[in-house]
Structures are given as C-alpha cells and as structure tokens.
Amino acid sequence: MHLFPDDERFVQFDRDEWSLLRAATPLTISDDELETLRGINERIDLREVAEVYLPLTRLINLYVSATQNLHKVSSTFLGTIAPKVPYVIGVAGSVAVGKSTFSRILQNLLQRWPDHPKVDLITTDGFLYPNAELERRGIMHRKGFPESYDTKHLLHFMRDIKSGKPTSAPVYSHVVYDIVPNQCETIKHPDIVILEGLNVLQVGTEADEFVSDYFDFSIYIDAEESKVREWYVDRFMTLRKTVFQNPDSFFRHYADLTDEQAVATAVDIWDGINGLNLRENIEPTRERASLILHKGNDHRVNNVRLLRL
C-alpha cells in the first residue's frame, strides 16, 4: 500500500494488497449466478469477485453501517424520527469499460449483507431525453454527452431519494435505443441505491447543483483508452450477431454489414462519439471518485486507488 505519486489524496493498492482486505468476507455467489450477471464479452470470474469485489463490499458495508449510526445519532440529538435514507453509490466510466456488469455484481453482493438487504440499481440511461427531443434539439449525434440528459429530472430524482421519499425512474430500452413511454421503475425505501452512468461525476450542471452531491460513495471504472476502444469494437461485433439481429433493434441496419464494414463502423463511432465523450467529459471526472478501479489489458482490475478520508 502506498500513496499514488501524482495525487496524495489517494492511497493505491496493487491487486494482491487489495485482495487481502477481503479479510473473512465469504464468497456468497456461485459461478452459475455470476454467469447471469456477466455482460457481453466480459471475462469476469469468481477469482475476480473474490479478490476485487469482496474487499469492496466489506468496505462499503462498513461505510453504510457508520452512516446509519450517524443518522441515528443525529435523530437522537434532534429528538426526531428521521425517514429511512438510502446510502447512494455512484458508478462512472466509459462506454464498454464494464460499468453495467460491475454494478450488477456489486448490487448482487451487497444485498447479501444482513444490514442492507434491499439494493436498487438505476442507470442514467433512463434520464436521457427521448430521441424525438434529441432530434428536435439537433443533438442526436451527441447522445450520451452531458447535454443529452434531462439533468433537472435526474436531480429531482436524487433529491427524492435522499429525502427518503418513494420515487420512480424512467425506463430505457437498449433494443429500441430510446425511453420506453409510460413505463417507470419504482424506488421505495431501499437500503442502498447504485446509480450507474457515464457522467454521474460530472460538474457544471444548472444552479451549481451536481448529481454527485447526493452520493455517499462513488466509483470510477478506469482503463487505457486504447483498450476500451478495442473492447468497444469487440462488443459491437458481438452485438451485430445477436441484439442487432432483432427486427425491433434501432441498430438493425448494422446486422448485415461485413466483418470489415462492421469494424470500420465501430471505429468511426468510437472516434467520433464515445472516445470524444470519454476524453472531454468522462475521464476528467475520474479524480472526483471515492474509489478508482483500474483495469488492465485482460479486462481484470490490477490496481485500486482509494480516496483518503
């Protein structure tokens, strides 16, 4: 364990050092269960869960317990009964870096701890403007960039969450690539809420209020851009043979591309949209996270940086 040379706010661990912090935390997930949580082309296995996720869930469990005790102390002092307020975790990182799989596994493991059995996972995709609105604003090509989100709606959602109020989030379909009309996901008195998205650590929203203001803990999934670009192209090639084959898929027109055309298309999309968004908006927020997990070439976490309290 040592201080990260470029930023003494963080303590850095290599994988072996981090894995020791698991202590006696049991591995409570099976390989069959893990299979249902893996994303496309994800190589995560039970060893990764044991060495990376279990120390993290132990740390978060300790933080949640401390926060719950703090709320009790505050209520005792004020002589009030405070509403149940969930512990909120933000998960940020690039397209194709593995945020969704990470968040699903984290949710699954955290809800196995007895002190916080109800863990809800929300993605910011539901807070994108509908495609019709993006077209009206002339920013369909900027989908995923900060301006493509209904930030006011997302902030209102976060206020409700942190007020202990039941609330709801819009539903997004990756098949039709749009918000699903008249559908929502209800959030009612969870112990923990995980909010996953590209720009959840972004600053510069209206009225100097940021989504991250409502986080108790935040995680950034990091990797070299050249590797994420490669993972994106690999995922595109897999989707071309699976999801894109669906007649309802927004990307159905990509399904019949040749291999050469598909690679060229994926590279163009990365260079013109996802890579640009990563460099301009996502990566600059990395140092705002409470924890940074860095992935190596094999998609496995090889070092961890934890913000000092």
Image (cartoon, rainbow, N blue to C red):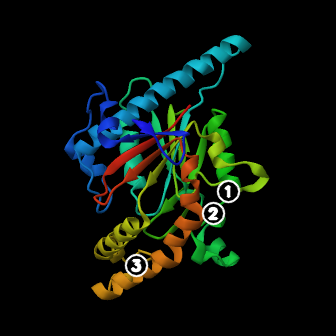
Residue at mark 3 = 266
**Label 3 crowd (10 A; few <14 / some 14-19 / many >=20):** many
Please tell me whether residue 175 is drawn above or below residue 98 in the rendered image: below
Q: Is residue 128 visible?
A: yes
Circle 2 sits in a helix, a strand or a loop, which is it? helix
Of helix, strand and loop, which one carries label 1?
A: helix
- Distance from disc 2 to disc 3, alpha carbons, whole Å, reads 22 Å
Residue at the location (52% across, 74% down)?
273
Residue 209 falls left or right of residue 92: right
Left or right: 24 in relation to 268: left
User: Few, some or many C-alpha atoms within 10 Å of disc 1 (few <14, some 14-19, many ≥20)?
Assistant: many
Percent position of residue 121, x then y: 47, 45
Q: Residue furthest left?
A: 31
Whether residues under marks 1 and 2 lie with C-beta atoms below 8 angstroms apart, the answer is: yes
Q: Earlier in the sequence, mark 2 or mark 3?
A: 2
The dot on residue 151 is: 1
User: In terms of depth relative to the viewer, which is nearer, 98 or 75?
Assistant: 98
Residue located farthest toward the front when viewing the structure as drawn? 5
Q: Amino acid at mark 1?
A: Thr
Query: Does residue 182 appear in this view?
Result: no
Mark 2 in CB contact with mark 3 (< 8 angstroms): no
Q: Amino acid at mark 2?
A: Pro
Mark found first going from the N terminus, 1 or 3 = 1
The quadrant of the rendering that contains the N terminus is top left
Please report the residue visible at 31 percent of the width from the left and 60 percent of the height from the top.
Answer: 297
* Viewer-proximal residue among 127 and 271: 271
In the displayed structure, would residue 227 be above or below residue 93?
below
Q: Which mark is residue 87?
A: none
Q: Residue at x 68, y 41 (%)?
A: 159
Instruction: Estimate the x, y position of residue 91 in percent, counting from the top left.
Output: 49, 48
Residue at image mark 2: 146
